[in-house]
Image (tube, rainbow, N blue to C red):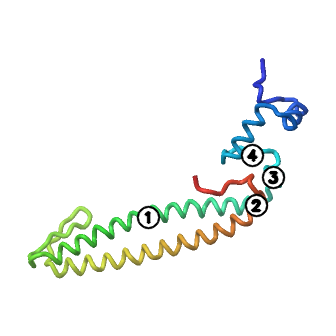
């Protein structure tokens, strides 16, 4: 069976390729200089992953997952907040008649004042949640910044902690 030209069992051949102008080196160099995922041998870190490092990496991953959850939840709440604000505006322009309030699968008849109070309370509650989510997002970003400094200091370009 024939081995592909860019892979070899013989480590001496790989070392020869790294010191010569072999076509695979030119490709690797172009990819690393153009922001590709491949690193040159000089850019790779030989640092061993310690338990502490793995815990930092895992913590960063959990924080990143929570960050994305916060952003999705925040976007949904802002959309609901906008809808509630629109409903409140419609109530202000109303004629004072009874309105139907939809809660879950049920409709309730309320006078305009009660419906306006309900909308205002919902807007206040949602805004508090949005504020808490934005605060949590800031805290997560701060903690991730610290972890990035530690992990990039230890592993250099061998680790990618950026969102794709």
Q: Which residue is mark 4?
A: 39
Q: Nearer the viewer, residue 62 or 144?
A: 144
Q: Residue at x 81, y 31 (%)?
A: 22
In this view, the residue farthest toward the front is 21
Count of labels shown?
Answer: 4
Residue 128 image point, x, y percent: 41, 78
Depth check, mark 1 against mark 4: the one in front is 4
Depth check, mark 2 against mark 4: the one in front is 4
Residue 87 image point, x, y percent: 22, 71
* Position of residue 31 in the picture relative to residue 95 (left or right): right
* Position of residue 6 in the picture relative to residue 67 (left or right): right
Above or below, comparing residue 25 to residue 65 in the picture: above
Q: Between marks 3 and 4, how big is the CA–CA gap?
A: 10 Å
Q: Earlier in the sequence, mark 3 or mark 4?
A: 4
Above or below, comparing residue 48 to residue 29 in the picture: below
Q: Residue at x 76, y 61 (%)?
A: 53
Q: Earlier in the sequence, mark 2 or mark 4?
A: 4
Q: Which residue is mark 2?
A: 53
Depth check, mark 1 against mark 3: the one in front is 3
Q: Residue at x 75, y 25 (%)?
A: 4
SS at badge 2: helix
Q: Nearer the viewer, residue 27 or 63?
A: 27
In this view, the residue farthest toward the right is 12
Q: Earlier in the sequence, mark 1 or mark 2?
A: 2
Q: Which residue is mark 3?
A: 45
Q: Between marks 2 and 4, how big is the CA–CA gap?
A: 21 Å
Q: Between marks 1 and 3, how big is the CA–CA gap?
A: 37 Å
Residue 73: image quadrant is: bottom left
Instruction: Estimate how packed mark 3 is, as few (under 14), some (14 to 19) or many (20 or more) residues with alpha carbons within 10 Å.
Output: some
* Position of residue 159 in the picture relative to residue 115 (left or right): right
Q: Which residue is mark 1?
A: 73
């Amino acid at each position: 069976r024939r081995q592909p030209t860019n892979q070899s069992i013989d480590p001496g051949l790989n070392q020869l390729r790294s010191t010569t102008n072999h076509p695979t080196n030119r490709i690797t160099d172009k990819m690393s200089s153009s922001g590709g995922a491949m690193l040159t041998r000089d850019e790779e870190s030989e640092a061993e992953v310690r338990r502490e490092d793995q815990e930092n990496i895992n913590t960063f991953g959990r924080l990143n997952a929570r960050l994305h959850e916060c952003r999705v939840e925040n976007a949904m709440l802002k959309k609901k907040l906008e809808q509630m604000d629109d409903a409140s505006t419609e109530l202000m322009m109303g004629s004072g008649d009874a309105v139907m309030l939809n809660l879950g699968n049920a409709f309730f008849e309320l006078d305009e004042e009660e419906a306006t109070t309900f909308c205002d309370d919902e807007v206040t509650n949602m805004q508090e949640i949005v504020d808490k989510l934005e605060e949590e997002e800031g805290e997560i970003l701060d903690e991730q910044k610290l972890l990035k400094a530690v992990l990039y200091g230890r592993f250099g370009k061998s680790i990618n902690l950026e969102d794709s």
